[in-house]
Image (tube, grey):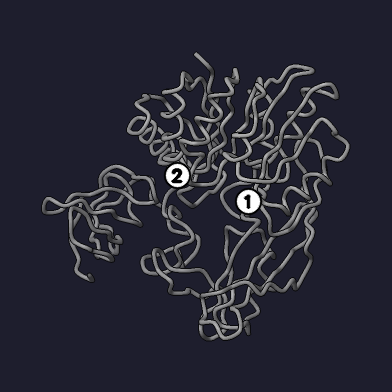
């Protein structure tokens, strides 16, 4: 820890770093780019075959290197961004390499991948931020792989003005602040304070809504009124973009049957419902009860949507109907073998899979392949510029 090594930087790896080899060991280097020669400071070494490091000095730079727009996007400081030191085009190319590598390694697929930019540019897009309050009452973000809080004066990737109220300071140490900027231009702020008698950072269940509470969003040709701090896409253009692609690939027939699993508030269910029409059926499954309530309220004009609150695998165990198409939008860990197997048992013609983690997507694609489903199409979107995250949509068809 703290020692420095000279490292030739190799290819990008999943997680916002690049791979190097020094003295026979793998070194995962942040703040570097492929092809660079850097002086790297070891930040984490638990023995074994690898360690982690930050590039603290660039001895030979990549032509894709730029000066970060935020002074906190630097070694040892804010962990919110991974690629501010790369051009936007280079960031998308790095993410495309990661998606392709995960599909090759975990699913045995050799695929050319392009990561597409969303409208609005690489700054000012983050509409949802969760801040942590340090012992001095100052809100900030954690350092990479650390509980240490880096106080913020602003954040260039966040929606302009969204953090103004939260960054005033004077909050209870150990609290967390949830900030949401909605499509109507309103900011919603909630404080999650430690439980009385609990240590800072533990037992956060005392929520206090300070500003707003019900967000207005627009996507798929509809206005949505939803819990401000529930799930919704972070990038302002992401929900509508994903809904468009899902609709194109789902192609549910009039009067048909479709499933929307991990439905959230029903964004994709609304698209499927318009396709199947009043004579069709859409099953929307979601474990979050507030999301289900919001979904039922927002889609009250679409009686062909039936909601089920519960874990996806448990709800599917009770089903014996056959959908024509299934839309999957699981959490970051992916759907997992049990859900994939339950979907495959229902023998849909098509599965449209929305994924925020390429490794989880690749694992589930491999599981689907074992049940007779092939990856037919893939699109990837830079829904999280400056970070290592990427959003993918995959179409799987039954062989």
Residue ranking furthest to the top: 399
SS label for mark 1: loop
Residue annotated with mark 2: 91
Instruction: Give the residue displayed 23% in from the left and 49% down from the top.
Output: 20
Give how far across and how far down residue 9 sits, in percent: 25, 48
Pick the front one: 20 or 160: 20
The quarter of the displayed image where residue 268 is located: top right
Query: Mark 1 to mark 2: distance in Å?
Result: 18 Å
SS label for mark 2: helix
Give how far across and how far down residue 129 sits, in percent: 61, 62
The quarter of the displayed image where residue 342 is located: top right
Pick the front one: 28 or 155: 28
Instruction: Give the residue displayed 43% in from the left and 55% down from the top.
Output: 82
50 vs 367, left or right, is: left
Quadrant in which the N terminus appears? bottom left
Pick the front one: 235 or 342: 342
Instruction: Give the residue displayed 23% in from the left and 54% down from the top.
Output: 27
Q: Which mark is residue 234?
A: 1
Q: Earlier in the sequence, mark 1 or mark 2?
A: 2
353 vs 76, left or right, is: right
20 vs 112, left or right, is: left
Q: Residues within 10 Å of mark 1 (few under 14, many from 20)?
A: some
């Amino acid at each position: 820890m703290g020692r420095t090594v000279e490292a030739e930087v190799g290819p990008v790896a999943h997680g916002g770093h690049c791979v190097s080899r020094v003295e026979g060991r793998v070194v995962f280097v942040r703040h570097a780019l492929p092809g660079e020669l850097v002086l790297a400071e070891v930040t984490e070494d638990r023995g074994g075959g690898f360690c982690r490091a930050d590039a603290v000095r660039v001895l030979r730079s990549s032509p894709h290197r730029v000066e970060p727009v935020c002074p906190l996007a630097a070694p040892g400081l804010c962990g919110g961004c991974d690629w501010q030191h790369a051009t936007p085009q280079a960031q998308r190319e790095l993410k495309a390499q990661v998606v392709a590598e995960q599909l090759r390694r975990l699913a045995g697929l050799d695929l050319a991948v392009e990561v597409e930019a969303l409208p609005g540019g690489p700054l000012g897009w983050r509409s949802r931020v969760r801040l942590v309050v340090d012992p001095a009452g100052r809100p900030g973000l954690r350092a990479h792989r650390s509980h240490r809080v880096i106080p913020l004066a602003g954040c260039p990737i966040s929606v302009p003005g969204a953090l103004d109220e939260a960054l005033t300071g004077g909050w209870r140490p150990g609290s967390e602040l949830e900030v949401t900027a909605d499509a109507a231009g309103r900011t919603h702020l909630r404080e999650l304070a430690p439980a009385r008698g609990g240590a800072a950072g533990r037992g956060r269940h005392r929520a206090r809504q300070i500003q707003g509470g019900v967000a207005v969003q627009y996507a798929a040709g509809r206005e949505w009124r939803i819990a401000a701090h529930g799930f919704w896409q972070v990038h302002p253009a992401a929900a509508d973009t994903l809904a468009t692609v899902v609709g194109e690939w789902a192609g549910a027939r009039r009067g048909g049957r479709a499933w929307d699993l991990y439905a959230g508030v029903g964004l994709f269910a609304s698209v499927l419902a318009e396709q199947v029409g009043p004579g069709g059926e859409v099953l929307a499954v979601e474990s979050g009860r507030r999301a289900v309530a919001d979904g039922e309220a927002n889609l009250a004009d679409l009686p062909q949507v039936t909601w089920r609150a519960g874990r996806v695998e448990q709800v599917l165990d009770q089903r014996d109907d056959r959908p024509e198409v299934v839309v999957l939008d699981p959490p970051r860990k992916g759907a997992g073998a049990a859900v994939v197997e339950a979907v495959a048992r229902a023998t849909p013609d098509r599965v449209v899979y929305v994924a925020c983690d390429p490794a989880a997507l690749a694992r589930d694609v491999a599981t689907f392949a074992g049940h007779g489903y092939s990856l037919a199409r893939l699109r990837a979107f830079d829904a999280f510029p400056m970070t290592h995250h990427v959003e993918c949509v995959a179409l799987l068809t039954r062989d």
